[in-house]
Amino acid sequence: MSWRCASAAALVFAAAASAGPEPATVSLRDLVLETQQLSDRMPRITMAWWMPSEFWRYSVEQSPGGSAHMGSEIVKVVSPYLIVAVVDGDVGPLGGVGYKDPDQLRKEVTVVTAGGAVLQPIAEADASPDVRNLLAMMRPMMANNLGQMGQSVTPMLFPALDPSGQRVADATRPGSFKLVVDDLQFEFRTPLASLVPKRRCPVDGEALSGNWQYCPWHGKPLAAPED
C-alpha cells in the first residue's frame, strides 16, 4: 500500500453508532489523493495535505458503524478550522531522511488566502478540546502506518475565516488558497473534483471532471453538472 493510501486508511474512524453507513457517494480515496501534494525536489521531500471538513465527514460516514449523524457531528467540530498536515525533510546521501520537528515547521508554514492575507498557525492550546483530541488521535495512527515519516507528520490548525470574515476554502465552491512551507508553495484549487458531479462535453457527451469549465479536446463549454 502506498503511503498516500495508508495515510487515508489510518484516519478512517470507526464510529460507534447503531445505524450502518449510508451508501458511499464520494470516493474517500479520490478525495485524499486530490488534497495531498508532494514535492520531491531532491534532496528534499515535502508533503502538504489539506483535510477539508468533507474528508472528516466521509471518513466517519464510511467507517464501520458510522452514520450521517456522526458525520454531521464531526463537521461541527472541525468547521472553525482549516486543518492541514505537513512533513518536510532533507534526504541524505544514503537515502536517510532528516525531518523537521513540529516546532520548526510551525514557524515556516503559513496559509495565503486568495485575497493575499497571510495566516499563521493556531496554537493547539487555543483550539477546542474536541479538536485537540482529534489531533492527539491522528499522531499515533500516522506513526503506526507510516513509520518515521508518520512520526514526523505535523498536523496544524489555521482559522477557517480570513480577516474579512470569508471562508478561506470551500471544497465545493470555486476558489483557491496556498499553503507555504518555507520556500515552497502548494496551491489548492476548488471545487474538488471528487466532491462535485461530472460535466458532459456537448460534442461527444463524454463525462469529464466536474471542476472543469471547458472540454480540453473540443474547447467547448461543458454542460451543467449531472444530477
Image (spheres, grey):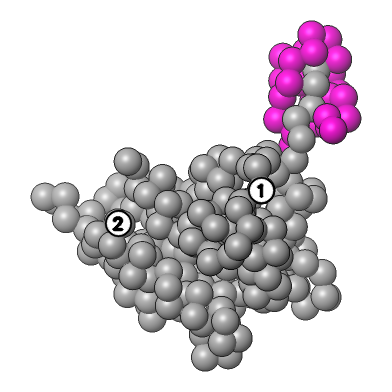
Residue type (three-letter) at the residue carrying disc 2: Leu
- Is 101 located above or below residue 15 in the figure? below
Residue drawn at x 80%, y 17% is 201
Q: Nearer the viewer, residue 177 or 42?
A: 177
Q: Residues within 10 Å of mark 1 (few under 14, many from 20)?
A: some
In the rendered structure, which segment of residues is drawn in magenta? 202-227
The quarter of the displayed image where residue 182 is located: bottom left
Q: How far apart are marks 1 and 2 (CA)?
A: 29 Å
Q: Which of 175 and 3 is in front in this view?
A: 3
- Earlier along the polypeptide chain: callout 1 or callout 2? 1
Residue pointed to by mark 2: 146
Residue drawn at x 52%, y 91% is 125
Q: Is residue 160 left or right of residue 41?
A: right
Looking at the figure, which quarter contains the N terminus? top left
Q: In this view, does 171 lie to the left or right of 89?
A: right
**Disc 1 secondary structure class:** loop
Residue pointed to by mark 1: 22
Taking the magenta stretch, the answer to whether it contains residue 225 is: yes
Q: Nearer the viewer, mark 1 or mark 2?
A: 1
- Is 3 located above or below residue 105 in the figure? above
Residue 64, image x and y in percent?
Answer: 51, 54
Residue 17, image x and y in percent?
Answer: 58, 65
- Is 92 located above or below residue 82 in the figure? above
Q: Quick check: can you spot residue 152?
A: no
Residue drawn at x 49%, y 48% is 37
The quarter of the displayed image where residue 226 is located: top right
The quarter of the displayed image where residue 121 is located: bottom right
Q: Quick check: can you spot residue 195?
A: yes
Residue 96, image x and y in percent?
Answer: 16, 55
- Is 54 located above or below residue 154 in the figure? above
**Disc 2 secondary structure class:** helix
